[in-house]
Image (cartoon, rainbow, N blue to C red):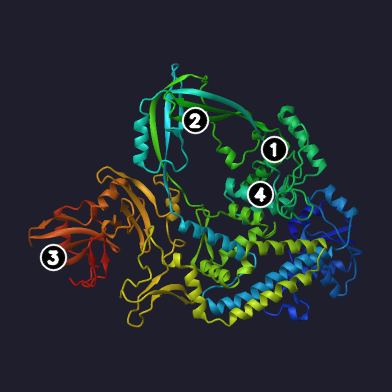
Amino acid sequence: MKLLIVESPAKAKTINKYLGSDFQVVASYGHVRDLLAKAGSVLPEKDFFIKYEINPKSKQHIKTICSLAKESECIYLATDPDREGESISWHIMEVLKEKKIFANFKRIVFNEITKKAVNQALQQPRDINLNLVNAQQARRSLDYLVGFSLSPLLWRKLPGCKSAGRVQSVGLRLICEREEEILKFISQEYWDIHIDMINSNNDIVTAKLIEFNNQKLEKFSIANQSQAQNIVKKIGNQKFKVSDVIKKQRKKSPPPPFITSSLQQEAANKLGFTAKKTMTIAQKLYEGINLNNEATALITYMRTDSVMLSKDFVDETRNFISSNFGSKYLHKQIRVFKSKVKNAQEAHEAIRPININITPQSLSNKIEADYLKLYELIWQRTVACQMENVVLNTVSINFFSLNKLHAAKATGSTIAFDGFYKVYKEINEEEEDKKLLPNLSRDEIMQVRNISPKQHFTEPPPRYSEATLVKTLEDLGIGRPSTYAAIISVLQERDYVSLDQKRFIPQNKGKLVTAFLTSFFKKYVEYDFTAKLEDQLDSIANGTIKWKETLQDFWTGFNNNIQEIDQYKIADIVSQIESLLASFLFPSTQKNDETDHRLCSACKIGKLSLKLSKYGAFLACSNYPNCDFTRNISTSFENNNKEKLHNDSSLSKGKNNKVIGYSETMQKTIYLKEGPFGWYIQAGEDSNNKNEKPKRISLTGSTDITLEIAEKLLELPKIIGLNPNTNKEITVAIGRYGPYLKHDGKFISIPKNYDYLNLSINDCIAIITKPPSQFRKTKKAISSNSDKVTNSKS
């Protein structure tokens, strides 16, 4: 009997139908042994001796494999065709040898699970590739040494922070640095001018003003509404003449077939799948799913950074295109793609359908919906890569004013030939401009019909999504096809980041860990260092360097770093982190803000400083025990709705500078901003003059504010009238703790069932007569833009 061992039972079931009765196919259920999850599993002092242990869940599977192996004349190790797969095969062989089973071991690999591929692999067996095994052992040992050396140090120095890892810490740094960019971003206002023109045939075209008074208009040339309106006024009813009509054709080539990272990115963008979900479904499609009552594999191996396709498959695909779409849709030559991935490893094929004739339509209602969606994506991209280019007609029309002072330009494009668009479009292609322009002639006179100034604000860089994070890691040469999904999962499991509207937001713990690592282990979270280490692992796999030398080089410096930082006092570490995170811990709300945001708001004497506990980080007053004021870290990372604001089309976007609208009543622009104590609205621009500070009102509820509501809020505090019972004024105001009435030296909360922006004098009397049950005689500080009340007694 012959024994063939694979990782998964699904894969075993698919392969079993291709082999004769003299084969027994069995699954190992993944890795059969691993490092002990405790200190001492990798021993640097003993030439990096590794202690492996059989996984408890694998003991029964090993028992089955051993039983069958004893009866087998030959054992084929058919685990996945990458480093992890090579390692699993090696471990199975080593375990069997330890149990005195010395069979004829043969290693076979295939990129697709078909009868032809499996039989070809059986005809071309080889030995275990120890270079691949050693590369995997080196990666696993590096991750272990970092985790089991750095994590205990974190526990001692940063209470509440769980652990740190070699590659995921670099991913976390990317996310934190992007958030820092967003925090520091200052939005800049700019305007552009669009002119609607009409010719004698009543053809209308909209052009963008590109020159004014013979001066080229750059992005920020028109800085405010006043400048924009001045330009509109000066252009007036000026006539324009067509100076140029430029027509061109542009060709667009299809993207290459999928690799692991590009599949994860496109599945996230088009299908909304997480990286983990994409890889789970792809694994099932590769191993085989139930189709017509038998296990059928649909795609090739899904962990790859190769864009290569086999010649046989390319020929089949080109025949399919010619037969189903016509020869005009088939590219004249076979397209051969080259990988853009840094150090693309192992000569696999790209991710593709096993059989191009199994169309998505033929699988409709036969497989699960999400499986079909991912298969369709892979199928479409694969077919598209051998199809003809898309041809776009582009038109540019230039205009000059008759007084030769101003110039404008209109552009548009249309699809002349859809080419590969017939089956596949990327997200950015689906949003392409399809603006049609009228057929105008040179020197044609155009009458101005309307001039529209448009206000814009520069936007901060977007937070990372799973797709953009994977793309960035790939571009930096960090991680490999088998690690991207795991990096993302670990960061979320450790509560270092959260996903909000599919964008990563660093949590406080993640921010602290990154600050700690960049302060005290900077070399080891540098992007270049991590990428170079990946290069070294590739070199081990290629057999050009020795794996234990790589471990020794890394460990010598890293261990010295650990020993040095272990001697630091916690207070010194916290002080360093506080300094690094100053803009995050004590955020300013405006440009050139000279306010001391560390000053304790309670005692006005002490300074706030960072403190750590097992429950997390917080700010506390240095005047303790005289002042016991504490505050949670003011953060844009947790429990906020900033992302909603970034996506709210009713607001012009920009960090700390979100425009609600222009108030004709106040003759000022109204902004929505965020400060240390939450969101507030502001009338007008920031000013360096302390005597000319803009009016501000705190928000305690929703930030979904209309211009009308904002104007009413900015009227506060507002005198409603005289109380006839006391002949004293009643004022409505809003503070940090919500809306309230001020009357006769007392401060009374306004119940939620009252609309505090539209209170009548009778409403106020009713509230004063029957104050809310939760009203306490001693009120905490309630502050508004013009009222500050501290420990007032009613």
* Residue 595 spot, x, y in % from top left: 35, 65
**According to the image, label 3 marks what residue?**
744
Mark 3 vs mark 4: in front: 3
**Residue 493 location, quadrant:** bottom right
Mark 1 residue crowding within 10 angstroms, few (<14) / some (14–19) / many (20+): many
**Cα gap from disc 3 to disc 4, whole angstroms:** 68 Å
Q: Is residue 291 left or right of residue 188?
A: right
Amino acid found under the numbered disc labelled 4: Leu
* Residue 386 spot, x, y in % from top left: 73, 37
* Residue 751 spot, x, y in % from top left: 24, 60
* Residue 142 spot, x, y in % from top left: 70, 70
Q: Which mark is residue 384?
A: 1
Mark 3 vs mark 2: in front: 2
Amino acid found under the numbered disc labelled 2: Lys
Q: Is residue 725 left or right of residue 259?
A: left
The answer to whether residue 566 of the structure is visible from this angle is yes
Q: Which mark is residue 409?
A: 2
Q: Is the Cβ of the residue at disc 3 closer than 8 Å to that at disc 1?
A: no
**Cα gap from disc 4 to disc 2, whole angstroms:** 39 Å
In terms of sequence position, does the residue under pointer 1 or pointer 4 come before the other? 4
In terms of sequence position, does the residue under pointer 4 or pointer 2 come before the other? 4
Q: Is residue 1 left or right of residue 567?
A: right
Mark 4 vs mark 2: in front: 2
**Residue 38 location, quadrant:** bottom right
Q: Secondary structure at mark 4?
A: helix
**Cα gap from disc 1 to disc 4, whole angstroms:** 15 Å
Amino acid found under the numbered disc labelled 1: Ala
**Cα gap from disc 3 to disc 1, whole angstroms:** 77 Å
Amino acid found under the numbered disc labelled 3: Asp
| Depth check, front residue: 375 or 253 | 253
